[in-house]
Amino acid sequence: MPGFLFALYLDVAKGKTYSIRGSLTLTLTFLVLLIAGLSIGASYFRALKASEKLAEEVINEAALAMEVKVKDYFLQLEQTMLIVQDWIQTAELNTEDDHALGDLLIPLINRSPRVSSIMVADTKGRELLFLQDPKSPRKWLSRWVDPKIRGKARIRRWDSIEGFLQERYVDLEYNTLERTYYQEAIRSVGNAVAWTEPGIFFVTRDPGITAVRSFTSGEDTLVLGFDLLLLDLCYLTMQADFSANGKAFLISNKEPKRVVALPSGAAELDIEAIRKALLAADPNSLNPDAAPELPLAGLSGLAALDTAVQVFASQVDEPEKFSFHYEGENWLGSFKPIQVGRNDFFLGTIAPQSDFIEGFAEEMRQIGFVAFLALLSAVLLARFVALRFAKPLEALVVSSRKIQRLQLDKETELPSRIKELRDLQTQQERARTALNSFVRYLPMDIVKELIRRKEVAKVGGKMQEITVLFTDIEGFTSISEGRRPDEVTALLSDYFEILLETIRFHGGEVNQLLGDGVEAYWGAPTPLESHAEKAVVAILACEKALEELNLAYKRAGKPELKTRFGLASGMLMVGNVGSKSRLSYTAIGDTENLASRIEGLNKFYGTRLLVSQKCRQLAGDRVEWRKVDCVRVKGKSEAVNLYEPLGLKSQVSPDVLQFRDAYESLLEKYQKGVFKEARVMVQELLLKQGDEPSLLRLKELLDAQTQDTASENWDSITNYFVK
């Protein structure tokens, strides 16, 4: 081929005639070679610039990711605090009973490693402190301070496994009302959690900040404080791994700026090493609540951090993103402001640019060489290419993009005489048809998310709070017996069409069909605010839609498909399970099992809709509720309150609400063991309501009791240990 091109060139130079194919080949050869050379050179330099921009984007994404981690770090602690406050306000915790508090708070602190200690104080100056022993993480102590017992404090010790250990009194001069955390809580206004400035903790003499909140409980005002060690915050920043040499840290935005959380490399990941690197002075020499002598940002001795702080401070408008030179290299940095209570911090993320473009130049040279050879080969084959490829190929590209977006409507074919193109069109249409069938078996949101991320589905998942639904048709086995398979599938087809569309309309994602039942999620795979509320509204809408369907079935002489619904909310592992060759998207955890159990419990109470206590709490008061029972189901040791959603507010009749109130009063009498009064109440209600199943169940339970009141070991929880 090169000899042919050279001979052709000589013919052209001599003015000889030549074929149009030869002319096109020669012209395209030199034109493409010229363009290729210029393009490769220009692409090389553009790629270098693009790599720098890519590095900036990566450092920015790393900064955003660290910002989310740090904010979530504080947010989780605040959410834990609100849980404890709710326990206290609902009388689930007695602030004067540290035995009961210890049984609940110590497991809570163990599950939230960000909390080092918890304080509960009142306006009388009394304070109860729970603190983890830093030398023995299994050991916990409580300290009770009461102004009536001056100069003394009661110390009790616990073991996370063995329980309460010992009690003693120690000498202690302590005034709760003068503590910084108490004053900050009293001073704060509104419902937001307040935070103290960094200070020295009273017991451990370690630096930290305290999340505080004041609230009313009964007739008293209480203060709740959660201590967060800066040492633990250092563990978060020191383990940032967004690049080989990248560093993350936290500094105060208050002059003089100080390092609040150390970067990686500042010390070994050991508590004593971190304490030594973080504190310039001996903490035992400082007074409690005093500001700790943290390293000065810019003069800390952490060279890369100091350089970044100095350059950032020199900027006129203090931009979030900037670059600086350190040890002969160009570094990229990002300082993002973070507000924690009245504390203004900067979250710093810095990394050398070489972390992101290392070896790029050599790779580009190789790519350029390979690209040049590929282009030269393409030019030599140019005379075998016909322009008729263009339009059919463009149409195939457009069609492929639509398939990628799961727009699977049939395309109008663009005729082509080239066999390979016609074969390609045929195969693409077959792929479209197969995919159109395939997506009907999977949640569409999952498939679209995989396509958007350009990933292949793989085993893995994440913890996520969602609401799970299970449904089942009452007596479906009897309904299907004696009917042809096509009759059964026709019944289910109309049934599922209404049920699934209603679930999707209200934000649910149908995960799978379980025979005549459905499993659906709210909040997965796509996170959804108010997932519990949307799920409850959805099952109410499903019940109404199925009532209309059953009326139509009844008029047509078909069997009614009465459906039971069970909802539960909680944290589950959501993702793909299975093997490399076969996957299933699902949610795994107690909440899923609980939802399935709750669905089956409907038959014991004559109800259609039942939800768990957590689901009812998250769903809020948009719906009228009836508390049905407190149960313990197979596979769970903890009891769960069951609730029946009666309908949306203002849409429930007064008679239903009156029965709800009377039933809940009766249930309360039974659970408290006041059997004599409960028997009278259940008889009166049965006269009004007739043979209402949940009332009949309570009557049977009361008839089984031979006494008028319960014994001391009375357990009112209903156990269902059979699936």
Image (tube, helix red, strand yellow):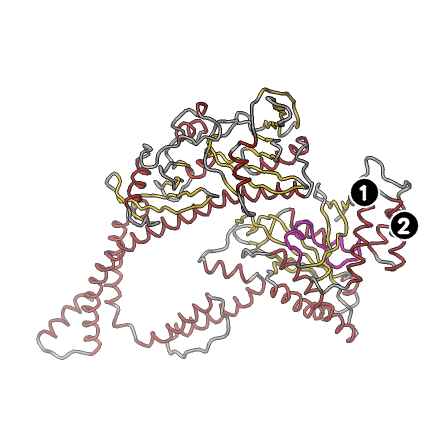
Q: Secondary structure at mark 1?
A: helix
Amino acid bearing label 1: Lys
Question: Relative to 584, is 238 above or below?
Answer: above
Question: Relative to 599, is 390 above or below?
Answer: below
Determine which quarter of the picture holds residue 524.
bottom right
Amino acid bearing label 2: Val
Question: Would you say the magenta stretch is mainly helix, strand or loop?
Answer: helix
Q: Which mark is residue 74?
A: none
Question: Relative to 34, is 214 above or below?
Answer: above
Q: Nearer the viewer, residue 143 or 105?
A: 143
> Sequence order check: which comes first, mark 1 or mark 2?
1
Mark 1 near mark 2, Cβ–Cβ under 8 Å?
no
Q: Nearer the viewer, residue 167 or 110?
A: 167
Residue count near mark 1 (Cα–Cα under 10 Å), binned few <14, some 14–19, many ≥20: some
- Residue at the left extreme? 14
User: Residue 397: x, y in percent?
Assistant: 40, 70
Determine which quarter of the picture holds residue 500.
bottom right
Q: Which residue is mark 1?
A: 672
The magenta stretch is 599-621
Q: Quadrant of the N terminus?
A: bottom left
Determine which quarter of the picture holds residue 350.
top left
- Position of residue 561 in the picture relative to residue 292 (left or right): right
Query: Which residue shows up at 45% across the image and 57% down it?
Result: 453
Q: How many marks?
A: 2
Q: Secondary structure at mark 2?
A: helix
Is 609 magenta? The answer is yes
- Position of residue 261 in the picture relative to residue 616 (left or right): left
Q: Nearer the viewer, residue 397 or 543?
A: 543
User: Residue 365: x, y in percent?
Assistant: 24, 53
Q: Which residue is mark 2?
A: 680
